[in-house]
């Protein structure tokens, strides 16, 4: 099953890295940093350019700008034409980026690569390429491990590490209609059955006749009177 949480690793290098114009560090976001839906970020890697199509020589590093997708919208998209035999679970420590229509996405071989988001003059490691369903398929955006969800663990392993506590001054983009499968959330009394012998609920689509209207009015009046009398008992 795809969707196991904690898809993240730390690697200790044997030697220090010498920074150059092409080799630069990236900032780690603190746990409080929130990257809003619709924010454009960049994913890079040397993975496949299409499903089962490898990056051709000389294997130049590829980059792609992708918009972030809210977690609930991403879960909704992955429920469209889902295969019960291969469940996909979007955990709370994940984030999604890409397009509902597909076409642009990370691919096999990009796993472990960075999803970088620019905030002001700083680049932050918002996510790490984790998994997806094929590459660039409709309703299957790329899924990333959200680094800000693992700051405590990173601090535990590397106490000296510094996190960037920045503020992203960008409002989330409305995702209404992005997932056509979106339904209302279930209510607390959904599925509750009436007591045997009690009047059955009336369908909202069925018009009430005059007698039914009188019964409902009398029932409502009795209920109001009961509420008025109870406190006095």
Image (cartoon, rainbow, N blue to C red):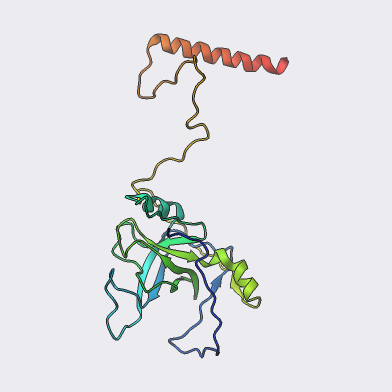
Taking the spot 46% from the left edge, 61% from the top edge, the residue there is 95
Left or right, 87 with respect to 134, comes to right
Left or right, 157 with respect to 147, comes to right
Residue lying furthest front in this view?
85
Q: Is residue 231 above or below residue 159?
A: above
Taking the spot 65% from the left edge, 16% from the top edge, the residue there is 228
Total numbered labels placed on residues in the image: 0
User: In the rendered image, is residue 120 in sight?
Assistant: no
User: In the rendered image, is residue 191 in sight?
Assistant: yes
Q: Where's residue 57, x and y in %?
A: 28, 84
Q: Where's residue 132, x and y in %?
A: 38, 63
Left or right, 53 with respect to 23, comes to left
Camera-nearest residue between 209 and 45: 45
Q: Quadrant of residue 107?
A: bottom left
Camera-nearest residue between 35 and 127: 127
Camera-nearest residue between 231 and 52: 52
Q: Quadrant of the C terminus?
A: top right
Q: Where's residue 21, x and y in %?
A: 44, 88
Q: Is residue 208 above or below residue 34?
A: above
Q: Quadrant of the N terminus?
A: bottom left
Q: Where's residue 22, x and y in %?
A: 43, 86
Q: Quadrant of residue 150?
A: bottom right
Taking the spot 52% from the left edge, 73% from the top edge, the residue there is 9
Q: Is residue 125 above or below residue 74?
A: below
């Amino acid at each position: 099953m795809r969707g196991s949480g904690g898809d993240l690793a730390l690697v200790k290098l044997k030697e220090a890295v010498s920074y150059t114009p092409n080799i630069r560090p990236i900032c780690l976001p603190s746990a409080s940093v929130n990257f809003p839906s619709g924010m454009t970020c960049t994913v890079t890697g040397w993975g496949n350019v299409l499903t089962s199509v490898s990056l051709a020589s000389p294997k130049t590093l590829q980059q792609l700008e992708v918009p972030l997708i809210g977690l609930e919208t991403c879960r909704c998209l992955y429920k469209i034409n889902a295969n019960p035999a291969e469940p996909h679970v979007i955990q709370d420590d994940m984030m999604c980026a890409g397009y509902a229509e597909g076409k642009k996405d990370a691919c096999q071989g990009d796993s472990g690569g960075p999803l970088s988001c620019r905030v002001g003059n700083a680049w932050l490691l918002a996510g790490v390429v984790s998994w997806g369903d094929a590459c660039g398929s409709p309703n299957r955006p790329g899924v990333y491990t959200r680094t800000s969800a693992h700051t405590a663990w990173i601090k535990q392993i590397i106490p000296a590490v510094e996190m960037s506590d920045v503020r992203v001054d960008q409002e989330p983009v409305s995702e209404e209609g992005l997932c056509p499968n979106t339904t209302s959330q279930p209510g607390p009394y959904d599925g509750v059955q009436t007591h045997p012998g009690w009047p059955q609920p009336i369908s909202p689509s069925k018009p009430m006749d005059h007698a039914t209207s009188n019964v409902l009015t009398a029932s409502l009046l009795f209920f109001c009177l009961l509420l008025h009398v109870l406190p006095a008992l």
